[in-house]
Each structure stands twice: as structure tokens, then as C-alpha cells.
Amino acid sequence: MLPKYIAAFDHAVYISQKTAGYPTETFRRYWASVLFTRLCSAAKSILHLCPGSPANSAGTFWDFSSLAPLVRSLVQTCLLHFYLGTESVGEDESQARLLIMQLRDCTERLRFFQNAGSSSEKIRGFEATANDIRARLSSNQYFTRLPARVQKSLRKGNAKSILTPSQILDRMGILDQAGRAFLAFISSHAGVSPLAYYRIGENNRGRGEENDIDKYYIATAVDLACDFILRASADMEALFPEALAEKSQKVAPEVGSERFRDAFDFVKQGQGALVDEFTASDGPESPMLCSDCFHDVGLRLSAERIG
């Protein structure tokens, strides 16, 4: 699993650096580059928690629960990369997606400064910005066609996207039921659910000692993350064909999800039968610069500038 992941990561960094500083007239390309940089950083961090990787060649600490938040973050970043940057949708929908993200950013900063006891002037500034974004949403034809209850919910600023993660996965067509089940298992560990600590100590699990269960979970989680890196890389190549005219060697994604079915069967054996329950259950006037993985000059723009 690891050699394939390393090859996918190297190819992603190549793409990020080839598109770095590339002028673009659309916010979709800009945000795709920003989120792709975020994805590359998470992918690099994952390697630091994989014993035997180039970033952790002498590592002897096996901790799936610490790796899980990074894998979930990488997956969520890939979903937003597709949703905000690379999926081909109409201009009104694309603009509505951006505005909802910016509204969430604004209201989140507003709550932070309110809780921090900041000056009323700063707070009023965020409130004015949030109201301006809501006014722009009210004139967006895509947004006004959404059901009234959805509009009301989104205008509160608590959602970072119009679509749910599951709906974005549906549109990406990247994971079947078995893959999503294992992703839910990863998320349980990332969120420190009882599932993440209930069986610490059994067969040396959860203490960093080398054991077959943590090694298997880590290998499968890294394999899942690899699929999302490959998908985001392919989407970047489609979005920036002129910047990536010279092709580097690509890593072919695996077909099918038997590996995730096997992994989740293994999860169920290790966690008990109750685990089955959760499976049931357009752009600015002047060009922007694309983000550059690890050598970034494209992120020094204000929210107004990139909105």
C-alpha cells in the first residue's frame, strides 16, 4: 500500500508545483489550488505517522487512532476541492456554493471574536459582512430556487456547503457502501467515539505497540486516502490542462472496492456485531495566483479579493 501512496503523493506535489503562481480568472481555479495545497499537506502529515515511510523510516509507533483524523481531514478536503473547485456546474450554483462557504467563514469568525470579548467595532464588521453575503444570496437564482426550509437553514451560516458530504460523494462516484462504511469507522476514531478506545489493550491495541489490527487499519486507511489523492490529482489535471501539458508518470487507481469490504469485515470481527448499526444507519476582474504546495505565495489575498 505504502509505495502506491508515496507515488500518488509525489504526483500530487508535482501538480501543485506545476500550477503554482498560475494566473486564473475564476475563483473555482483559485479555490481548487488552495484546497489542493491543503490536501498535499495532509497527505504529507499522514506519512509521518506511517512507520517505514520515508518521513518515518525508523518509526516503531503504530497508532491508527492518531492517523484517523488526518485521513478524515484529507477526505473532507478532497470533497470540498471537488465541490468548490472542480465539479462543472452552472455559474449561479457555483457562486452560491462560494457564498455559503464565505458565510460560514464569516459567522465562525464572528462567534470566535464574540467569545474572545473583542471590540464591538470588529464584531459589527463581521455582522455587516454576513448580512451583505445574505443579500447576495437573495439575488442568486440558484439559491432562491432551493426549498424555503433549506434557504432558511443555510442563511444561518452554520453549513459549510449546500450539499452534504454524502451527496458530494454520490456526485464524485468514488466510494461504494463498503468504502463509506470504512470511512465512517475512520471518522469514529477521529471523533474519539467509544469505538476508538473501548478495546484498548486487547492484543496490544491502542498503545502504539506493533500489532496486526492497528497495522491492518492503518494500511487500509492509507489506501483509502490514496484513492482521494488520485481523484483530486486527476481533477486538477482536467482543470489546468495548459499548465500540466507535460505529463509525469501517473498512478493508476484500483478498480473495485473488495479491499474495503475485506477491511470492514475485519472491523466487524474486531468490534462486534453492533458495528452493523452505524452502517445502516464567475470570477474577479484581475487574475489570481494559484496556490503552491509547500512554497506558497498564492494565499496572501484578502477575503474580499478572492470572493
Image (cartoon, grey):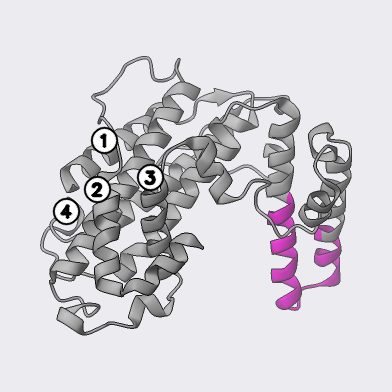
Which callout, 4 or 2, points to the residue nearer the camera? Answer: 2
Residue 28 drawn at (x, y percent): 61, 31
Per the image, label 2 sits on a secondary structure element best described as: helix
Instruction: Confirm whether the magenta stretch covers residue 116.
Output: yes
Give the percent coordinates (x, y) of residue 75: 43, 50
Amino acid carrying label 1: it is Glu
Quadrant including the C terminus? top right
- The residue drawn where x is 82% and y is 45% is 147
SS type, badge 4:
loop
Q: Which residue is mark 2?
A: 259
- Tell me the distance, in whole angstroms, between the alpha carbons under discs 4 and 2: 21 Å
Q: Which residues are magenta?
A: 103-126
Residue that carries the numbered disc 3 in the rendered image: 40
Camera-near label (1 vs 3) is 1
**Quarter assignment of residue 159:** bottom right
Residue linked to disc 1 = 254
